Amino acid sequence: MDNTTSPQFPETITKLLLFGWLDYTIFFMMFGFSALIGIYFGCFGTKQSTTAEYLLGSRAMGVFPIAMSLTASHLSGITLLGVPSEMYMYGTQYWACMFTSIIVSIIIIYVYLPVFYTLQLNSSYEYLKLRFDERIRIVALILYVIGTLLHVPLVIYVPALAFNQVSGLDIHLMASIISGICIFYTTIGGLKAVVWTDTLQFIVTLGAMFTVFIIGTSSIGGFANIWHIAEQGDRIEFFNLNLDPTIRTTFWGITIGMTAHWITSLGVNPSSVQRFMAVPSLKKAKLCVVIFGLGMIFTKAISCFSGLIMYAKYKDCDPYTSKQINRPDQILPFYVLDVARSIPGLPGLFVSGVFSTALSTMSAYLNTLAGTIYEDFIRNYMPANTTDTSANNIIKAIVVISGIICVGLIFLVEHLGGVLQISGCFQGAYTGPLLGLFTLGMLFPSVTAKGALYGSVVGLVVMAWIVSGFQYHYIRGTIKYHYKPLSVEKCDSFNITSIIRNITTTSSTDFDLHSQPFFLFRVSFYWYPVIGALIVIVVGLLVTWICKEENENKYNKDLYSPIVHRFVPKNPQQYEIIDQIKNSGNKTDKEEHLLSFTDYNK
């Protein structure tokens, strides 16, 4: 770590980087509108009187708000602040996620989405009960609850960190305020409030991102100049084809590793599936995926290029090395307040956008988490005469309790690494096993419940061990990652010529062979979802083969992806009907048997 004494910057600079009254006005107006949307859907109109209305919007939502909600939920503060920081500190290899967006959209449309829409389930985990048994659904539910409770605190912490930078208010106080507003409108408004606030917040976020993008590009001298500066600073890297998985960022790690992660979070995650089920047809659900994919490409591209804009601005006076900011994740709000302070209200608009991403992600996760816990667990123990009002009250209580737990876990998140890295580690521990379970179910008709159970347990244990080992060694400093060169050569407040922060990646040149952590602990977090999914699939297939049990559901095509329907065996009863058709002596009998066969397949 750098032990350089933190310089004392003039008080005037500090004042220039704080919010003004117009910024505060715009900021709080944003949250006021979000709360009003929740009040509208919770207290007027249908008032979310049934469970179907509360969780699925009566399955009559439009394509546009659903697509915007999906994009907004994925475009969290982790993306908005973490991706530009990634570009600034590590270079442009992360930009390969453009390919990932296309691949993920195609796979979701043709592999996973048709199964969920055909079955018309309220929760994606209901599928696991139909395909395997209750035990598998409970395992998946536990994975999802743990993953959500670890991910949401990070989503809240990121904008609270940004607001702390511009206001000086306590991070935990701001996190509590954000969460309170989000819990309020999510609780009373249900899915309709979540979707429409997501849409409003996404528009604000996109406007803020685009405005900062235009101002930054213009202030540096255009695209060509920014690109030239980035090349001189060794930031441009797109096709690092090294197959070594211990290298933090490679083309393969981004395209393959992130494909597995995004399929889990967008293709089988209950939050996404819930919104796909809220539109009235499969065609419209597919259209939502297409629009979402395009939205992801656009927003990721802006976020990535913003990192290069910031590097061009601070190539000779890095605010992280010079201690003007405490974490790399703070560099984007620092930049916005620095270059846009002459434009009244723009800093407030931008920070509102950062907070909006947190609200949209948190609201979607809380709404889905509550619905999933109720549908997949509590509902089984409720009396048969339970009213929709009682069910909705239970779901709302779960939203409140989950939100409070997430706020408490922020104290854990703030002591770990960069937001993109923390997110990759935490989500990698559970997204891989979940993806493995759904992939086993939809693409491997022979796999049994026992195989899926053993595979999921082994996958979860191994991934928890890998993530824990990595975090332990990262905090100790025995695993380090390489920042691109950073300079403070032209910082006026420094008495030294240049400081280069050059933290190197753990490799054979940094440590001798005996001092290196175990190989799996050094694997890049981008590969975690792939490792977890492969463990579940391989163990599941092996256990199924060793036990030689029959899958009781192997004849039901609705449980499998359309791409493997040709490999799903026909039910023996179907063969009997076919034989009757072949052996029928007259045309009338053949037509009757054929009609019977057709009805059976329906």
Image (cartoon, rainbow, N blue to C red):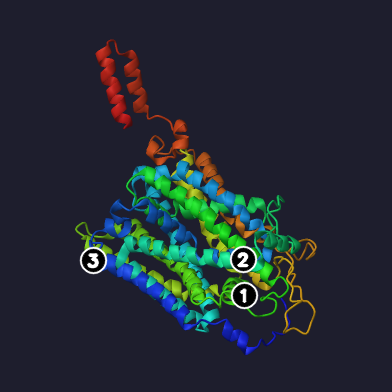
Residue 298: x and y in percent read 53, 55
Q: Are marks 3 and 2 in contact (CB under 8 Å)?
A: no
Q: CA distance from mark 1 to mark 3?
A: 44 Å
Instruction: Write down the quadrant of residue 144 in the picture.
Output: bottom left
> Does 367 sit above or below residue 401?
above
Residues 57 and 132: in front is 57
- Is disc 3 surrounded by few (<14), some (14 to 19) or many (20+) residues within 10 Å? few
* Residue for point 72% across, 51% down: 242
* Residue for point 32% across, 58% down: 55
Q: CA distance from mark 3 to mark 2?
A: 46 Å
Which residue lies under the disc numbered 3? 44
Amino acid type, callout 3: Phe
- Residue 218 tag number: 2
> Does 505 sit above or below residue 103?
below
Inspect this view and state whether residue 143 appears.
Answer: no
Q: Is residue 535 left or right of residue 226?
A: left
- What kind of element bears circle 1? loop
- What kind of element bears circle 2? helix
Q: Work out which quarter of the rendered image holds the C terminus and state it.
A: top left
- What kind of element bears circle 3? loop
- Residue 459 tag number: none
Earlier along the polypeptide chain: callout 1 or callout 3? Answer: 3
Q: CA distance from mark 1 to mark 2?
A: 26 Å
* Residue for point 37% across, 43% down: 282
Q: In the image, which is nearer the foreground, mark 1 or mark 3? A: 3
Which residue lies under the disc numbered 1? 327
Instruction: Write down the quadrant of residue 37 in the picture.
Output: bottom left
Amino acid type, callout 1: Arg
